[in-house]
Amino acid sequence: MAFGNAEMKPAPFDYHRPATLEEALALLERYEGDAKVLAGGQSLIPLMNMRLARPAALIDLERVAGLTGLRFDGDVLHVGAMTRHMEIERSAAVRERIGILSAAMPYVGHLAIRSRGTFGGSLAHADPAAELPALATLFDATFTIAGSGGTREVPWSDFFITFLTSCLEPAEILTGITLTLAPPQAGWSFHEIARRHGDFALAGCAARVELDAEGERIASARVALFGVDATPVRLLEAEPALIGLVSSAAAIADIAAAAAAKLEPATDVHGSTAFRRDIARRLIASGIRDAAAHASSLRTPEKVRA
Amino acid sequence: MPSSWVGTPVLRREDDRLLRGAGRFVDDMHAAGMLHAAVFRSPFAHARITSLDVSAARALPGVHAIFTAADLGAVNRPFPLPVPHPKLRAKTPMPLASDTVRYVGEPIALIVADDRYIAEDAFDHIAIDFEPLVATPSLQGALAGGDCVIHPDLGDNIAARFGQSYGDVDAAFAAADVVVRERFTSDRGSGQPIETRAVFAVPDPNTGILTVWDTTQSPHVARRLMAATLDVPEDRLHVIAPDVGGGFGPKVVFYPEEVLVPFAARALKRPVKFVEDRLEHFRATVHEREQVHECELAAKSDGTLLGMRVRIVHDTGAYVPWGVIVPFITLTTIPGPYHLPNYDAEVTVVYTNRVPVTPHRGAGRPQAVFSMERMLDRLALELKLDQAEIRRRNYIGADEFPYDVGLIFRDGSPMSYDSGDYPQAQQTALEHIGYDTFRAQQAEARAHGRLIGIGMAAYVEGTGLGPHESARMRVDSSGKIRIMSGAASQGQGHETTLAQVAADALGMPMEDITVQTGDTAGVPYGIGAFASRLGALASSAVKIGATQLRERILQAAGSFLEVAPDDLEIVDGSVRVSGNPTQSIRLGDLAIQSSGAFPGSTLPNDLADIGLETTAYFRPAQSTYASGFHVVTVEVDPAGGIVTILKYVISHDCGNAINPLIVEGQVQGGLAAGIGGALYERTVYDDMGQLVSGSFVDYLLPTSAEIPAAEIYHILAPTPLNPLGAKGAGEGGTIPAPAAIVAAVENAIWPDGSFHLHAFPLTPELVWQAARDAQGIPA
Amino acid sequence: MTPDRHTVALTVNGAPFKRTVEGRLLLSDFLRHDLEFTGTHVGCEHGVCGSCTVLVDGNPTRSCLMLAVQADGHAIETVEGLAPDAATLSPLQAAFRKHHALQCGYCTPGFLMTASALLRVTEHPSRLEIKEALSGNLCRCTGYSGIVDAVDEIANGKPNAV
């Protein structure tokens, strides 16, 4: 797109701030696909300022009741879609029960972004280089989506379609996300390589590993990548191959290399496909090892978790 | 009161209002009835405009006017060229493109509306057709010309070809024990001050004077060019640079909006404000840095330099708004602080379909220093000499000043280094970084899988360019001193530093002195802020003026008190006989009386001058040469090519520092720009001339997390060329940083010596690839 | 097209304001031009430079990424609210001055607001934590070290720590 004119004020739109979900849905229907939901605005408003997004209307969800909050219920965590990143970052319960989410938060933009940005907004924006979509894939995330016809639950594997595209229809609203927590003995690791603090990652890896009863071999592993393809990537093919390996196994590097070779990361001014693949390869290998080491440390009661 | 205000780290006066958010930047200004402008710009790098119809846009509610080239009439002609050169085939910009556009972002129309939102809405309603032409695909492609000639009457894209030489380079190469050859490239970057450009023109119907609030670094130059292009007498224009949010060079240049906005204000008889947004800034405000250098260096086997040959290709963008300053400075900076007995440099300046190029902090010197310093590293490798040693063997000694380089500097005067201590600068820096123990640390780190490296670079920088700077000062009727300087400020602290200088010369406390900058009404002639000149020049003008003013005060007081001036002193706002407080006159009263307080009366016969006021200029005979040495240690993460700076040590010679706090700030700030230019800031154009890195998402400025605090050591080598002994301090933090950092990265990857890195800025991918090359991993 | 207009009632530095604005008006422009709090500056309008940072209900926020209408019912704090009175600067502002943490001053209000927010929630941030917290604000003049020193002094009483 020819970019000569460089506008930086939004084009005109109608602004609505409904009080209920029903109202919000009705408004979306009314605009027949030409309205956008406004959550935190940290991704949408820059696009609108640059006039790359020009919806006829914005439906602000700030006043809609029932869309915020963190609720632990047995082994699941319900996150209201409008829950601000900041709330998650500050939650002691999250730090204790799903520590990888706390660890990832400081990488999500900067403080000011996290004041307003929302968990649901980040997931719905579906930027494959973002941290949260990858984490969602690691925890069997299911997405609760409201439409005028009712509510549906969508697993993560059907939610992320492609670059900046989720399965949300124009007249639907993501209301909540349910994460299934890992068992308490699962270790985890989170790494990304970015050019500057707070930037989108060149590539990143979140991993989760459980060890066998003896604490020596990998009993199960989950590996999620970001910045490496058009959506976040779970290494579903590679994960079973990790079972039975010790964390020092040379085979892990081979599995990482094979998995990375299958990735199709984009080329842009920050890096080429080959570069990102190589970063991914290293992060996969180190991610698995670090998660296994973490799992190992959890088994020793006197060791304090980092 | 300190014995001397100069040299004291006085806290800044500017800070109070700036910390409160009470600064007055151009976009903070309001006027009743004001309108807002936006510029409609070319989306093509090279195209003919085949039709343009703005009638629908004009009819949009809230739009007051749209000006195209046709509407400007005779005003739409190429700008005067501020800095001519005999070999330059100059194509200066026009206010608006009429039939051909030559870079993405070139202005086509000015829209004036009730607010900026509506003005941007009008873009959608402008009906315009283009016939795309072939855009220059790259610097090399532009050089080749052919089907992408930008200014057809020139026949090709060569803006200028010129060079300088001294000695006999051919003989030097013939006699050499060793010759090394390398090619270096640097990418475009841009200044990116946090405040973009803005122009706010306010007509006064009662006086006929147009006040123009402008983010310019040179209000007087801007006024002169505005007057020339608008065909309006200079005294009908009042240009004021209020608080300005950073300049760094790009705001020195005269831009189309500085004609368009005053034109619109006069035509509409209403105040009109234009504020550039950030995306526009990428496409419309000047860039700098892209060059290609082919270098050959000849030396003896002991490392003594014999001669150097350089061929430079310089991208100047689609027009030359300022001249060929940058490449001129590049080729005169290359010899640096070294004995280089023979030199031959030539530059080819090339037009490209990109934003025009004029100086940005460093102004062609980072590229020059990169070449010389990397060539020295290359030579050291060839001769198996230590990098510090090869420099030591070639430095001009501290006892060799004045040292004639053999070149003409860009101010037209022969380059003569006036002062410095290059060997000491290196020694100090290397001591403080622990150079002697670094090898061992590096080996230890490597054993643990960490790649750390060290790199260094020295530089000499011509500062304090003329032609002059001015200061006008008076004692007002309250007894306070008011100084108006021809300087303009974008954060350098002139309100404080110039008051320090005046306080010393007047023998009065700083609190009694106020300084104003950036106003064409303040002084008749001024030049402005660029090339690190104000520390040397504006201060010198103030010192000269304040010394004169003190003399006038004493002479006038002597006349009214009937006492010899030598017997008088200035204390507590009065002039009095030394040691006799009863025989005194308050300064304010003296100002009133000496300027004729009582109409119809007669002044004393021996009163030499009317009033207590003076205008002083400082005219430097030549530039004065600051210098320094940078050494840096880095860690390279081969996984992602991420470079972390571990320690950065700078030796810095800016002569006498007027305010050490401010000098440190300039060096540290300059370093941040240098690190940005070495590791983060890269402008990318595609082969159709579209700007790919056109926002802060893709053009990365380093943050607090990436910039370390440098250790800064001052080398004191005052200059004899101005009354303060001061040299420029604004660019020394930037100039050698890319050379030092790239050398350090190379050293981290190839600690046993190897020469692979020929370009800046580095990117993570480039560093990653280099690390793989070092490990023998195929690409 | 008739503009879409809405009432906004908010407080700025404790004082109540009520205005009618167009839906698309950015909070940054509203504060600067409608309410004349020109201390908040605009540097990029795409959420990167941080010079527009204000506090919304105590939280650091990029006002260029918020619509004025979204501020309805909220408490905004800007740089103009930091100094206790015309004769005195706040300790943080005084520390900025002492450490030469500003040159042109354009990015300064954004840094002050971000630092204020950090200091409210973290009692003694480490120097690294300070640098990371401030990494969402860009400065082109100072090279950051003075800014970090100033915040470090307020946070920990020891400037110039390594």
Image (spheres, rainbow, N blue to C red):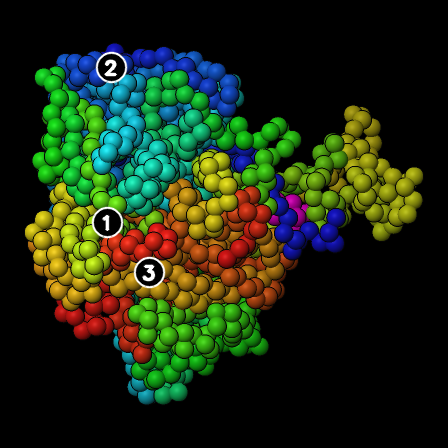
Chain of the residue displaying label 3? B
Can the viewer see residue B180?
Answer: yes
| Residue range corresponding to the magenta coloring | B495-502
Q: Which residue is mark 2?
A: A20
Chain of the residue displaying label 2? A
Q: Quadrant of the C terminus of chain B?
A: bottom left
In this rendering, which labeled residue sits more in front, label 1 or label 2? 1
Residue B603: quarter of image: top right
Distance between the Cα atoms at labels 1 and 2? 39 Å
Chain of the residue displaying label 1? A
Q: Is residue B506 above or below residue B95?
A: below
Q: Is residue B498 magenta?
A: yes
User: As rendered, which of B745 and B336 lies closer to the eye?
Assistant: B745
Image coordinates of residue B566 in percent, x first then y, are 85, 51
Callout 3: SS: strand
Image coordinates of residue B7 in percent, x first then y, are 65, 55
Q: Which residue is mark 1?
A: A186
Can the viewer see residue B231?
Answer: no
Label 3 crowd bin: few (<14), some (14–19), many (20+), radius 10 Å: many
Image coordinates of residue B104 in percent, x first then y, are 22, 41
